[in-house]
Amino acid sequence: MSDLLENERITLRLDSDILKLMDEFVANSREFSNRSQLARAAVSAYLEAKVAGTEEGTHRRPNEVMVLLPPLVLDTVDHLVDEGIYTSVSEALADCARHQFLHEEHVESVKKDAVQQRSAMKVVPKT
């Protein structure tokens, strides 16, 4: 079997309180179905965050952000996803941001400011 296809195993000892938190998280998660999946994602996220300041360290796209939501907000968004209104939490938050920042009045204001800035600029010829 190719080395690229093999996963190596490690043994990880964790405090029982951490394991309890992991189990509760997995039980309430749609993304992770077991501890191993959560642990792999957590280690990857930790390592990416630690090297995010280096050129090769981040895999995050320029428009990708991490947001911490209050529990009630997340519960509400999760409910909207469960009801099929959105396909994911990410889609729901992107839609909220679009409605907040790209509503018609705001877009018109941005366009007006851009026109004013262009008209205020003058090209000064070289002397």
Image (cartoon, grey):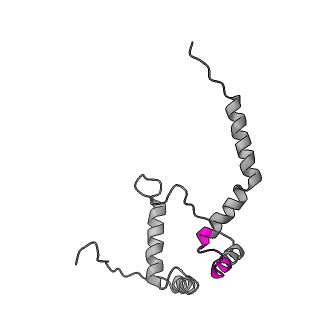
Residue 16 forms part of the magenta stretch: no
Q: Nearer the viewer, residue 73 or 18?
A: 73
Q: Quadrant of the C terminus?
A: top right
Q: Quadrant of the N terminus?
A: bottom left
Q: Residue furthest top?
A: 127
- Give how far across and how far down residue 125 sits, in percent: 59, 17
User: What's the residue at 49%, 62% (across, down)?
Assistant: 49
Q: Nearer the viewer, residue 14 or 3?
A: 3
Quarter where residue 101 is shown: bottom right
Direction from residue 77 to residue 4 in the image, left or right: left
Quarter where residue 122 is shown: top right
Tell me how many marks there are.
Answer: 0
User: Is 72 above or below relative to 107?
Assistant: below
User: What's the residue at 67%, 28% (across, down)?
Assistant: 121
Q: Residue furthest right?
A: 105
Direction from residue 107 to residue 65 in the image, left or right: left
- Give how far across and how far down residue 10 sits, in percent: 35, 79
User: What's the residue at 56%, 87% (across, down)?
Assistant: 27
- Give how far across and how far down residue 92 sits, in percent: 64, 69
Which residues lie in the magenta part?
78-91
- Give how far across and how far down residue 115 sits, in percent: 70, 37
